[in-house]
Every structure is written in structure tokens, then in C-alpha cells.
Image: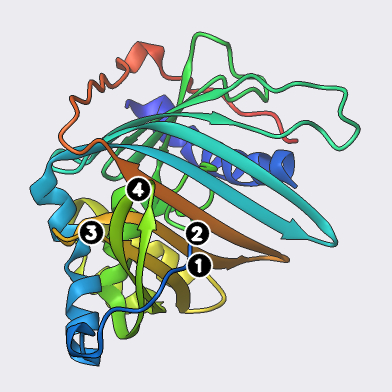
Amino acid sequence: MGQLHRRTGGAVVTAAAVGLMAVATGCSGSGAAADERPGAEDSVDAVRGSADSLVRAGSSKARTSMEMASGGTRVTIRGQGSYDFERQLGRFVVVLPKDPAGTEEHRPITELMAGGALYMKNRGAGVPADKWVRIDTASLSDGNLVTGGATDPLAAAELLRGVSKATYVGETEVAGVKVRHFRGSADLPRAARSASQGQREALGAAAKGFSKGGVPFDAYLDDQGRLRKLRQEFSVSNAEVASTTLLYDFGVKVDVRLPASEDIFAGKIAEQ
């Protein structure tokens, strides 16, 4: 993005990660028949393979929510958009909660996810309204699993490549679709080693940045092995974060156009 942008990248990353966090400061059903319950090894294989199933599906729409709990305060950030799993490109609109006093409404943030980069518009903090902020996800201590307020759907699925143990909970439904529910924990370093090229560096950063290497999850897979719902829990500094992603309308057309270099803000983001 040019010499000026590279020089200021560190400030952009730090302010975006800290600033957004500061602003933010399934169903159950009967189990399957005994002879249909997958064994432990089959459960691990099914969960690990869910990212590949999404790539084969091509694309989908998605809804996300991120619940943050810290010091007795709980807030929720919501997002909605679509994602192309083959090209690792997504576009989401993220809605931040009101300030604690409830007096200020935040403009929705538009986010573009591009396999290694996060672009944010309406970021605030001194960034002009017509400019984008670009962040290298590998430079974030959480690999953008939390920072953007909406977990990259493919990164979330790729994290499941680090599953070593998974339990089959039973059959249930998500948005009217019959799914299999699995529960377990994913190992971040292992996931980073097994991730696709576009996600490997970001997950590697997360493996080093999170205080805990294990990420508890609940994954809901349809009969084609595709994730329909994924809930993951992260420990960030003094906060606990639960990220939930719902995927639907597979095969939808996804139109993502990355901003030109002149539309990217190269200045310093104000601290919040």
C-alpha cells in the first residue's frame, strides 16, 4: 500500500484492535439412534472437514454475533453479510452497541474480509468517512477472530482443523435444517499448521496471542458436512468473548470489490 501506509500500519492495527474492543466494552433435540451415532474418530473427521465442505459449497450468506463480558458488563456486536469461501472474500455490515450511557448511536461499520486483510469503513476515530482502514490480520494478536467484531467465517471454520477430540451431542435443527451437533475444543497451534494458505498466518498469530491455546466450540453440520452454526469461546485480556456464526443460502452470488489504494487511510487513528 506504499511506504507511508507501511510506516503507519502498526498504529492502525493497535488502534483498531483496542478501539473497537473499547467501543464494544441452538436448539436442543433428541439424539440419533444408537447405530447412527458417529464414533469419536468419525466426529473429529466430520468437524475437521467442515472447512473443506464450505469451500466446496462456494459461498453463503451469514449472520454473526459477538458477546463480550468484562467486569460485569455484557455487550453484543452483530453483523450480517455474505462470504465467498473459494476466493476467501466477504462483505459484512457490523452494528455496534450504544455507549453505556445510551446517548450515542454508532454508524454501522462496513467490513471487507480478504484472506489475510481486513478493510473497515466508518471506523471512526479520526478516519474520514469516505476512507477505508486496512489491517493485516497476521499483525493482530487474535488473527481477526475477535478484533473486527465479526469473526471471519472461513477463519472460524479453519480453526476447527485443530480439533483433536469432539463429542457427538445429537441431532437437532438450525433454521429449519436438520443438523448434527458436535462439541469439543480446537487447538490453535494445530489449526494454524493445518490451515489454508490464506488463513495460516492469521491463525498463527492467534495461536501466539491468545492466553489459552484451546478454543471451546459447538458446531452444527448439515447432511453435506457444511457448517450451519458455529459457536466459539475466546479469552481476550480481561474479557470473555463468545462468537456465533450462522450460515445459510449456500451458493449465493458474493460481490466484493476491494478499495483502491487512494481510498485507504494512511494516517494515524485517534486513540479511544
Q: Which mark is residue 176?
A: 4
Going from the N terminus, do you reach mark 2 or mark 4 first?
2
Numbered disc 3: secondary structure: loop
- Residue at image position (39%, 47%) is 246
Specify the quadrant that holds the C terminus. top right
Within-10-Å neighbours for mark 1: few <14, some 14–19, many 20+: some
Q: Are marks 4 and 3 in contact (CB under 8 Å)?
A: no
What amino acid is at disc 2?
A: Ser
Relative placement, left or right, of 121 versus 173 is right
Task: Give amino acid for label 4.
Answer: Gly
Q: Amino acid at mark 1?
A: Gly
Could you tell me residue 10's position as x and y percent?
A: 51, 43
Q: For mark 2, what is the residue? A: 141
Q: Is residue 77 left or right of residue 50?
A: right
* CA distance for labels 1 and 2: 4 Å
Residue at 86%, 29% in the rendered image: 102
Expressed as whole percent of the image width and height from the top left, the position of residue 181 reads 35, 70
Q: Identify the residue under disc 1.
A: 209
Instruction: Report the Cα–Cα distance between label 1 and label 3.
Output: 32 Å
> Answer yes or no: do the residues labelled 1 and 2 have beta carbons within 8 Å?
yes
